[in-house]
Amino acid sequence: MKRFASILAAVALILISHIAFGQRPNVYILATGGTIAGTGASSTGTAYSAGQVAIQTLIDAVPQIQEIAQVRGEQVVNIGSQDMSDEVWLRLAERINELVQDPDIDGIVVTHGTDTMEETALFLDLTVNTPKPIVLTGAMRPSTALSADGPLNLFNAVVVAASPYSRDRGVLVAMNAQVHAASQVVKMHTTSVESFVSPNTGPAGTILNGNVTYYSAQARTPLHFDITGLQTLPKVGIIYSHAGISSDIATAMLSSGYQGIIHAGVGNGNIHKNIFPVLKKARAQGILVVRSSRVPTGPTTLENEVDDEAYQFVASQWLNPQKSRVLLMLALTRTHDWQQIQEYFNSISQYTPAGK
Ligand code: ASP
């Protein structure tokens, strides 16, 4: 109740100050590259290079955003997000944690490639501690394409970041006129502009005519990891299961410095008989094992067909393999206790609307 009252007071204060003084909110853009900053030789083909255009050019291409907010920005990196790294994640999170301390900044937009956007969104959700809106956006078509989607996505992301109704919702993704929670959103189509969905819950809201509307209340995740001063993250890899899988690749991971393995299993996180002994050996070596699933929707539940307690495996609940990797890396900066790590996976799943 107290928390609700203080959120209401903060929203009222922001609204009153903006109405009374005619101020537009201040939105800061951090650019990291991706197709939104991409260029191609043809406006109708699919061939292009990501991460070519600098931040000011992106802002200048959408003068309408200046009606919504006072916008400035800086370039963090200019890469295709297939090249995203722990180092860039740590740098980005540190910079955002710095920027949100500035009382003159009301919200932040991160422009990003779409390939790993869902991973970066979750990483920031777990490492940036602020009620201020942090919104990721990008584009499925390069800036030189006919009907490029980047300009409207950037406009909409600024709308979301500038809105007091976006406060205290954790990190959001604004793509194709929809808003998604970091824990839920996935890239579901390789080429369509309608690529980003929250398959278990549906989107958190929609953006229309320069306004964002949320469908329901949504709290920030209770989990927060302090990454101050960290230069590297624990090494965690993913094994993708399939019919007839052999143990070679998984076995190689046991002697390659991995502290954690995510098993992208079949069905409800099931494990092939060839892989089971390798994962047992991993646990005996102190490597954390998380069972997730290659199935795109639904949870990987504890103690279903696998006796997790007996093997000391962690079930990923509602997180897909790539997001499980993000949480496990951060968890391992704090503990190697599998039961504690299971608690992290349970609690991130409970705060989401689909949590059980
Ligand atoms: N490969 C690009 C990237 O993730 C794709 C995109 O942005 O849509 O940077």
Image (cartoon, rainbow, N blue to C red):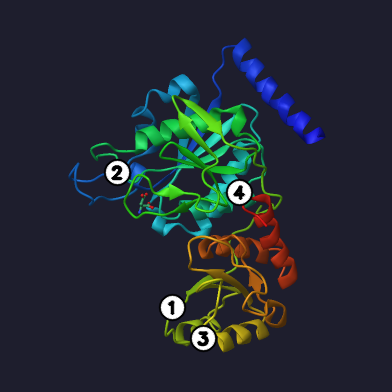
Q: Are marks 3 and 2 in contact (CB under 8 Å)?
A: no
Residue lying furthest right in this view?
Answer: 2
Sequence-first disc among 4 and 2: 4
Within-10-Å neighbours for mark 3: few <14, some 14–19, many 20+ = some
Which numbered circle lies on residue 251?
3
The CA distance from mark 4 to mark 3 is 32 Å
Q: Ligand 1 near label 3 (Cβ, under 8 Å)? A: no
Q: Is residue 257 above or below residue 134?
A: below
Which numbered circle lies on residue 125?
4
Query: Disc 1 designates what residue?
Result: 242
Sequence-first disc among 4 and 3: 4
The residue shown at (67%, 25%) is 11
**Mark closer to the observer (1, 2):** 1
Which numbered circle lies on residue 142?
2
Quadrant (top left/top right/bottom left/bottom right) for the C terminus = bottom right
The CA distance from mark 3 to mark 2 is 40 Å
**Mark closer to the observer (1, 3):** 1
Quadrant (top left/top right/bottom left/bottom right) for the N terminus = top right
Where residue 259 appears, as percent x and y from the top left, is 61, 74
The residue shown at (71%, 26%) is 10
Q: Are marks 4 and 2 in contact (CB under 8 Å)?
A: no
The CA distance from mark 4 to mark 1 is 31 Å
Sequence-first disc among 1 and 2: 2
* Element under disc 3: helix
Under mark 3, the amino acid is Thr
